[in-house]
Image (cartoon, grey):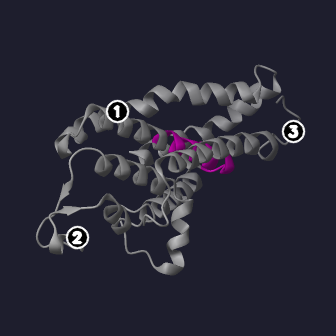
Amino acid sequence: MTIMKKFFVICPVPPEREVINKERLSGSYRLSAYYMAKMVGELPLTITLPAVYHMISYPMLGFQSMGVFLTLLGFLLLNTVVAQSVGFFVGACCLDLQVSITASALYTLATQLLGGYLATAVPPWLAWARYASMVHYAYQNMQILEFGVGGPVLCSQPSKFAECKNGTTIRVESILEAQGGASGQGLPLWANTAVLLAFLIVFRTMGYLVLRYYRVPNWSRTTI
C-alpha cells in the first residue's frame, strides 16, 4: 500500500514541474504555497486507502481490542505519510518520470527487504542497514502492540522458539528477536515513533529544498 501511495505522489511531480516554474515566475504563488497545498490536498486520499485496507484485513487476522486496532491504524497511516514524503523527495530530484519510478522502486524494495517481514535472515554485514528502513520502525511498533497487548501467544508444534520446548507460550521479546529486532538492539515504542517522525520531517524538508535551490528554472530567479 505504501508503494502505491509513493508512486501516486511521484507521478504528478515531474509533469507538473514546467507549470510550477512558469507560475512561480509570473508571481502567481510561492513555491512554499504549492508545496503545502500539494501535501495537504493529497493527504485525504493518502490515508483513506490504507485505512480501508486495515479495517478489512485486521479483523480477519484476529481482532484483539479496539485500542490496539486504532493504534495500529495510526502507525500504518504514519508509515504511509512517510512513504509519501519519500515520493515527494524523489519526484523533486528526478526530471524524468521513469527515472523517478525506478529510483523509488529500488528504495522501496530495499526498505521492505530490510524491514523484517519479508526477510529475517539478514547477513550480519548488512544488518546495520535496517536502521535506514522506515518500514523497520513501523513494523517493530506494530509487533510490540499486537503481541504485547492481549492474551499470551501460544506455541504451535513444531515451533522454532526455545520457550515451546518446556512451555506453552512465547515471550514478546522472542518474537521481536525472530523478526530481526532483538530486544537488546531494538528500540522501544516511543523511539520507533520518533524515528518515523524524523523521517517525515527530513524527507519533506529535503523535497522542498531541492525544488527551491536545485531545480530552479534556468531562465530567471523565482519566488520562494
The residue singled out by tag 1 in the image is: 70
Left or right: where 204 falls relative to 127: right
User: Of the residues tagged 2 and 3, which is closer to the observer?
Assistant: 2
**Numbered disc 3: secondary structure:** loop
- Label 2 vs 3, first from the N-terminus: 2
Q: Between marks 2 and 3, how big is the CA–CA gap?
A: 68 Å
Residue contact between numbered discs 2 and 3, judged by CB atoms under 8 Å: no
Q: Residues within 10 Å of mark 2 (few under 14, many from 20)?
A: some
Left or right: 70 in relation to 169? right
Q: Earlier in the sequence, mark 2 or mark 1?
A: 1
User: Which residue reaches farthest left?
Assistant: 157
Q: Crowdedness of circle 3 by 10 Å Cα count: few (<14), some, many (20+)?
A: few
Instruction: Please state the extent of the stretch shown in magenta in the rendering.
Output: 80-96
Give the Cα separation between the discs numbered 3 and 1. 50 Å
| Residue 209, image x, y percentages | 76, 42
Which amino acid type is shown beneath numbered disc 1?
Leu
Q: Residue at x 78, y 27 (%)?
A: 24
Q: Amino acid at mark 3?
A: Trp
Q: For residue 201, which quarter of the picture? A: top right
Q: Which is more foreground, mark 3 or mark 1?
A: 1
Q: Secondary structure at mark 1?
A: helix
Majority secondary structure of magenta residues? helix
Instruction: Say whether disc 3 or disc 1 marks the residue closer to the N-terminus.
Output: 1
Q: Which residue is mark 2?
A: 163
Instruction: In this rendered view, identify the residue nearer to me: 158 or 49.
Output: 158
Residue at 67%, 31% in the rendered image:
35
Using the image, determine if residue 194 lies above or below residue 224. below
User: Looking at the image, which residue is at 47% across and 48% down?
Assistant: 189
Label 1: few (<14), some or many (≥20) within 10 Å?
few
